[in-house]
Image: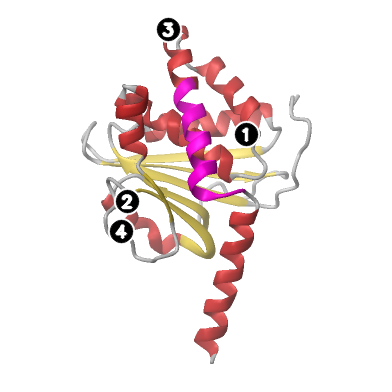
């Protein structure tokens, strides 16, 4: 049973996490999926893909989240695209919904296909503020948790505690909390982020029809 206090009704929410091998994308997807399924009581499917190289090849993890049983487990049009590399941004931007949200690591992604995106130097924060670049994925998890109006930080921390080796739990919780704080500072509050994305998409649609 879920330990969530409030369960926001979701019909279907699609999310793609993408970047390079060695950035911990697959682990990030598993942590996020575990937290939403076990501690928020959502139905979640998670699929993943990565290149032949352990490091440097492309890597992605897709999640579909719903309050109801999921009939089709793969993503088709994503609501949230997280791109931690230029290649990932270039390759996957086309699957983002018009009213979706694009999040990029501005150190790694220097050219975005749109000026509508949320950017933060995830890699720099993990390296300089936490002192360990391997915490990139849990730092990103903190930022994503802030962006998702239906995700609760305390429950995501619980997911971290249950899935990380004991010797690195505190380090990764520190990274998670930093990602959460920095997202609040740089991105603004959710759900306003999503309302603004929907409004901008509607304005662009009207302009295209005129």
Q: Earlier in the sequence, mark 2 or mark 1?
A: 1
Count residues near mark 1 (Cα–Cα under 10 Å), then give few for <14, some for 14-19, many for 20+: many
Question: At x 52% / y 41%, what residue is drawn?
Answer: 144
Provide the residue span drawn in magenta: 174-189
Picture coordinates of residue 176, whole percent (x, y)? 49, 28
Question: At x 75% / y 47%, what residue is drawn?
Answer: 9
Question: At x 47% / y 14%, what residue is drawn?
Answer: 169
Q: Which residue is mark 3?
A: 167
The reply to whether the C-beta atoms of the residues labelled 2 and 4 are less than 8 Å apart is yes
Mark 4–mark 1 Cα distance, whole angstroms, equals 28 Å
Q: Which residue is mark 2?
A: 88
Mark 3–mark 1 Cα distance, whole angstroms, equals 24 Å
Picture coordinates of residue 179, whole percent (x, y)? 47, 34
Count residues near mark 2 (Cα–Cα under 10 Å), then give few for <14, some for 14-19, many for 20+: many
Q: Which residue is mark 4?
A: 90
Residue at the extreme right of the image, as rendered: 5
């Amino acid at each position: 049973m879920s330990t969530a206090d409030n369960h926001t009704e979701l019909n279907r929410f699609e999310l793609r996490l993408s970047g390079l091998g060695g950035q911990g994308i697959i682990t990030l997807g598993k942590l996020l999926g575990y937290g939403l399924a076990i501690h928020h009581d959502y139905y979640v499917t998670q699929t993943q893909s990565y290149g032949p190289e352990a490091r440097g090849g492309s890597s992605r993890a897709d999640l579909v989240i719903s309050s109801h049983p999921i009939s089709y487990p793969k993503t088709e049009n994503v609501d949230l695209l997280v791109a931690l590399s230029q290649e990932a941004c270039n390759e996957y931007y086309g699957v983002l919904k018009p009213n979706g949200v694009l999040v990029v690591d501005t150190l790694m992604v220097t050219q975005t296909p749109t000026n509508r995106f949320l950017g933060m130097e995830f890699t720099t924060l993990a390296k300089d503020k936490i002192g360990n670049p391997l915490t990139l994925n849990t730092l990103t998890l903190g930022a994503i948790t802030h962006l998702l109006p239906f995700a609760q930080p305390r429950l995501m921390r619980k997911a971290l505690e249950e899935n990380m080796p004991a010797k690195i739990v505190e380090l990764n919780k520190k990274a998670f909390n930093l990602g959460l704080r920095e997202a609040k500072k740089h991105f603004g509050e959710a759900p306003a982020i999503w309302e603004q994305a929907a409004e901008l998409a509607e304005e662009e649609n009207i302009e295209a029809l005129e």
